[in-house]
């Protein structure tokens, strides 16, 4: 799971613990009752953050596209937490009255509110076609984001001297922090011409790219995982979509363990085998063993 959804869920759970401790204290000593703090720890802290964390993880997979403002998730997290903590501190000390505390309370409320508006924007429009989703690669995007969203560009990177990207570890580490522009500078590649090549490839105008029957679905920026090629065995981080494409016979394993509904979900092609297993509360080893049995059988035939 990507870092911000995970952080939202962790933060939400911490607020739950604090909210419950306060609730229990309030029922023992009614004089300590700070209803506002209790309610907002539990509802604006725990519940809203849990919903945000799960939704940021699930909805891009449901709709098979990135949220319209991926960078905004970080701002949502910061604003939601800073606003909430500020509200919780200032409310009991006269936040609803005027004066300095009242002003501070309003300010923190505004900050939290902006955070929630960012959440609304990203989650509402990830489900909607009203906002055109980014189809253009810019120099400011990290290499990992470009590869995650437009996996077909990997060949172009490799052909233009970014050979280290052939290594999945480099794709999972270095590529996450280096922007396309910086990568070009480091490799002495003309970034304007290179970006043009990448963007032409998106429109299917790259002569080096093989024509495909169907356009690949756009992958969320947060996707990570390994493609599998014929002759390879499946590993925990293999992408299910790639696995099914290379070894269609392995589909039966997923149908057996997860049920047939799985394949109607567009997100399945962006998940790693281990992620799908943990989502269904099954030991990934069981799935891997079954999948590799099928692959071994197919390779021996
Ligand atoms: C063991 C856990 C909890 C305890 C002991 C507890 C205790 C309390 C107490 C004593 C009050 C009354 C405060 C007052 O009227 O002054 C209260 C109100 C409230 N609690 Fe909790 N609480 C717990 C967990 C939660 C959770 C998990 C949520 C939400 C997810 C929650 C939401 C609320 C709300 C919304 C109110 C206000 C209800 C109203 O306006 O009448 N509480 N709680
Ligand atoms: C930026 C977000 C939010 C702000 C600024 C905010 C602000 C407030 C304020 C100013 C009050 C009145 C407090 C008082 O009378 O002393 C209030 C009450 C309340 N809020 Fe929020 N709130 C926010 C989000 C939420 C959310 C997301 C929930 C539930 C999911 C929620 C549930 C409640 C409840 C149940 C009360 C009634 C408390 C009572 O009965 O004393 N709030 N909120």
Image (cartoon, grey):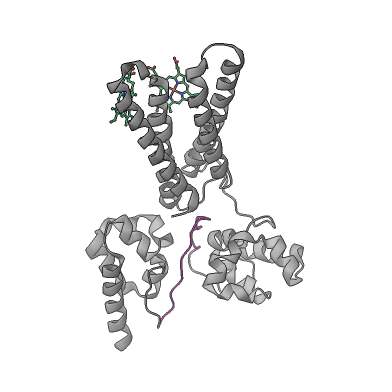
Q: Nearer the viewer, residue 207 or 246?
A: 246
Residue depicted at x 46% and y 66%? 225
The reply to whether the magenta stretch includes residue 8 is: no
User: Is 290 positioned to the left or the right of 173 in the image?
Assistant: left
- Report which quarter residue 108 is drawn in: top right
| Magenta segment | 215-230
Quadrant of the rendering where the C terminus is positioned: bottom left
Prevailing SS of the magenta stretch: loop
User: Is 142 positioned to the left or the right of 40 in the image?
Assistant: right
Please say if 168 is above or below 266: below
Residue 98 x, y percent position in the rendering: 58, 11
Residue 245 x, y percent position in the rendering: 39, 71
Quadrant of the rendering where the N terminus is positioned: bottom left
- Report which quarter residue 44 is drawn in: top left
Answer whether residue 208 is visible to the viewer in this image: no
Residue 236 x, y percent position in the rendering: 38, 69
Residue depicted at x 47% and y 19%? 92
Q: Nearer the viewer, residue 6 or 271?
A: 6
Please say if 85 is above or below 160: above
Q: Nearer the viewer, residue 1 or 230?
A: 1
The reply to whether the magenta stretch includes residue 221 is: yes
View extreme (top): residue: 98
Please say if 125 is above or below 114: below
Residue depicted at x 38% and y 71%? 243
Residue 219 x, y percent position in the rendering: 50, 58
View extreme (bottom): residue: 300
In the image, ligand 2 is in what quadrant? Answer: top left
Answer whether residue 186 is visible to the viewer in this image: yes
């Amino acid at each position: 799971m990507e870092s911000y959804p995970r952080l939202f869920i962790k933060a939400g759970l911490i607020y739950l613990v604090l909210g419950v401790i306060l609730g229990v204290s309030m029922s023992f000593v009614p004089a300590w009752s700070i209803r506002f703090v209790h309610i907002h720890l539990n509802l604006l802290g725990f519940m809203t953050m849990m919903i945000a964390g799960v939704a940021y993880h699930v909805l891009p997979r449901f709709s098979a596209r990135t949220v319209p403002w991926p960078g905004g998730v970080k701002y949502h997290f910061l604003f939601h937490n800073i606003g909430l903590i500020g509200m919780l501190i200032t409310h009991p000390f006269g936040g609803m009255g005027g004066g300095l505390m009242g002003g501070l309370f309003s300010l923190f409320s505004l900050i939290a509110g902006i955070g929630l508006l960012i959440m609304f924007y990203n989650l509402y429009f990830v489900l909607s076609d009203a906002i055109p989703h980014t189809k253009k690669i810019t120099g400011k995007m990290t290499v990992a984001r470009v590869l995650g969203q437009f996996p077909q560009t990997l060949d172009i990177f490799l052909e233009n001297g970014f050979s280290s990207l052939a290594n999945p570890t480099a794709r999972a580490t270095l590529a996450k922090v280096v922007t396309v522009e910086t990568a070009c500078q480091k490799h002495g590649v003309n970034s304007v011409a290179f970006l043009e090549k990448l963007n032409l490839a998106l429109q299917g105008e790259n002569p080096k790219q093989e024509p495909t029957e169907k356009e690949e679905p756009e992958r969320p920026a947060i996707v990570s995982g390994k493609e599998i090629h014929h002759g390879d065995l499946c590993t925990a981080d293999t992408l299910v979509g790639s696995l099914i494409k290379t070894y269609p016979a392995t589909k039966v394993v997923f149908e057996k363990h997860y049920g047939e509904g799985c394949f109607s979900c567009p997100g399945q092609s962006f998940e790693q085998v281990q992620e799908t297993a943990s989502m269904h509360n099954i030991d990934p080893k069981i799935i891997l063993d079954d999948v590799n049995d099928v692959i071994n059988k197919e390779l021996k035939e």
